[in-house]
Image (cartoon, helix red, strand yellow):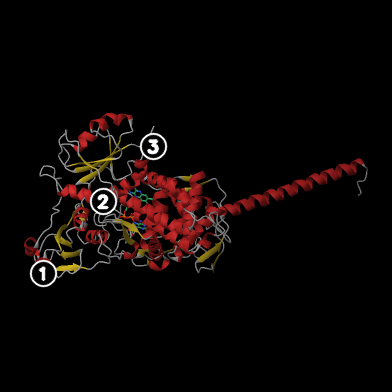
Amino acid sequence: GTARLYTEDDPLVLLGSGSLKRSVSSNSSSAWLVQFYSSWCGHCIQFSSTWKALAHDVQDWDTIIHIAVVDCAQDDNFDICKEYGVSFYPTFRYFGAHASPADLGKTYRGADRGVQTLRELMINFLQNHTRLGKPDHCPPLEPFNLGDLLPLLGQKSAHYTAIIIEHPTSYVGREVILDLSKYTGIVVRRALSIDTPLVDKLKITAFPSAYLLHPNGTHTHLHLYMQLRFFFTSFLRGLQGVQRRQTEDHSAPNPMGDLSEHHSTDPWREFDSSKVYMADLESALHYLLRVELATHNTLGGEELKKFKSVVTVIAKLYPGRASVQKVMENLLDWLVRLPLESIPYQAILDLVDDKMRISSLSLGAEVRWVGCQGSRPGLRGYPCSLWTLFHMLTVQYDASPKLLASTALEGDPAAVLNAMRGYIGTFFGCEQCGRHFEEMAAQSLDQVKTTEDAVIWLWSKHNQVNSRLAGSLSDDPVFPKSPWPSPALCPACHQEKEGVHTWNEEQVLAFLRQHYGAGNLSPRYLPEPQRHLPTPPLAPPQAPQKPQGAVQALQQQQPTPRATAVVLNGGGAQIRLHSGSGGWILGFTSVDMSLCLVLYVCSCLMLMLLFFFFKIRSRRWKLKNGRLHV
Ligand SMILES: Cc1cc2nc3c(=O)[nH]c(=O)nc-3n(C[C@H](O)[C@H](O)[C@H](O)COP(=O)(O)OP(=O)(O)OC[C@H]3O[C@@H](n4cnc5c(N)ncnc54)[C@H](O)[C@@H]3O)c2cc1C
């Protein structure tokens, strides 16, 4: 009956009567820091955000030390809490690796329970364990001296070696060592500022400092924007060849399924991660409209409404090529004007492929990932491009809210997010992702009151997803998921408060506006826009072709073409005004034309009926009144 303070989504382990002893004792290769709490205790409720922040902060240390909780207010846990002698809440217990079943853990009684203090406490425990209690994967945390490090200078190696030189009381070096404990291609060591021969040899004058030995034998002093843990860690993780070891079971299915598949035969395209590539955005639209949507035979009711919303935001806010904007505008125009309850998918496809010949352009029909390339098939690709597309749209909307004027979404600061929520929940091929996204949206989307909030909301939710997926099957080891933007992309976005990394949201907003602004779009690697040859004004007789789509079938019932004219619209794209098999006259669809024709015939019939009715009545009247001559 108690509220749950922690859930499976938090980066910590939920333990109870059935799992506590089994987890923390003999068979555990890692250490544990367990909080015994009670979900009705006010202090525990207040403290839960700090414990979650700690768990988040040391998430990458979990092969060495786990953060866990036991809720002693749960009936099932009464006995185990009693057995462990817990009588006050919260109680913190540390268990070394390979602990015996009789080990009840070491209790921390300190009054300071801030994230930084608890993190340092964990390091102290890890450094002072007995030989048996040492976690199997714990790297050396003791300082190295000149004698240990000198032989490495100038030596070629299979990996980088980073040396953090710091004051004896500093924890930064050990924190960085633990932060990189899951990474291959790099080894981190620490040395002390009091080791004068080493400090002199490396010419270090400020502490903490980082010194990097490259695999090719060269070595350099690292000059980072700030000498903080987050900056060191982030820089070292970004080095070429440094990769996160994946921790998940590789036989488990990847929740992304084949959404990220791409042509493995594609040549690698060099790209700049500070740019956004139009090729990725167009590939996203191609995949969304031609592959993902194709699983729905018809769109009707709520689905159709959600689809219209997403087409509206793309048509009005898409910052890429005019040809693509035109395709989306035509699609929107058509969806808005077609007063149907449901639409066959094939009709949408025909329009995207320009089979109705609205203009001479259609959307490119291939995926070409650039900034969203994965290191192997099955990684990155479409989901990456979908995030990118929606980030761009939130930023475009923030820059020009008037772009959605006169649409059904006008005036809604969360218009793009709502459209994205509708799309992800209904159409996105990864169901599990859709559920997670919906949970996040249901929790906090209503707090978005301005278009700025919308930009920040999506950024922060995307970072939540990144942190949840770090090290998972969908994490590309060459592009590991981490808090974004990295210090390399936006140093001013990062700061530290009481030893904990925080964001400078003002700087983040400015960065997002620049990064996802239209000015940062790169046309590199774009395929040529797809153009169709104009239909000759008087087409030669053709053999009847197999109808290719619902709209075409409708069009083929129309009379044969007689005349075609071509004009330029405001945006410069060509629009055909023609009758016949094209089915579009002055912007009216063949459905519009058919309706006109039916109404026209009906009104003629009505007029004729009225005419005959009155004619017969007047004849009767004349006969009755003997005025046949009138
Ligand atoms: C709505 C949604 C929900 C998803 N949920 C899941 C899930 O539950 N499980 C799962 O396995 N996969 C999920 N995915 C897929 C996953 O998030 C990644 O898209 C995929 O693994 C590819 O990752 P990536 O490395 O290309 O980077 P992505 O996370 O796809 O990011 C794409 C690009 O956006 C930029 N970026 C990164 N973070 C941010 C940020 N915070 N703000 C702005 N820009 C940023 C970077 O340039 C990055 O390269 C989801 C995708 C979407 C679109």
Mark 2 packing: few (<14 Cα in 10 Å), some, or many (20+)? Answer: some
Alpha carbon of mark 1 to alpha carbon of mark 3: how far? 58 Å
- Specify which label sits upstream in the sequence, 3 or 2: 3
Mark 1 in CB contact with mark 3 (< 8 angstroms): no
Q: Tag 3, which secondary structure?
A: loop
Quadrant for the N terminus, please.
top left
Q: Amino acid at mark 2?
A: Thr
Q: Amino acid at mark 1?
A: Lys
Relative to residue 592, is residue 381 drawn left or right?
Answer: left
Alpha carbon of mark 2 to alpha carbon of mark 1: how far? 33 Å
* Residue 142 visible at all: yes
Residue drawn at (23%, 33%) of the image: 84
Residue 549 x %, y %: 47, 50
Of badges 3 and 2, nearer the viewer stands 2
Residue 548 x %, y %: 45, 51
User: Which disc, if any, is residue 320?
Assistant: none
Relative to residue 382, is residue 168 drawn left or right?
Answer: left
User: Which disc, if any, is residue 117?
Assistant: 2
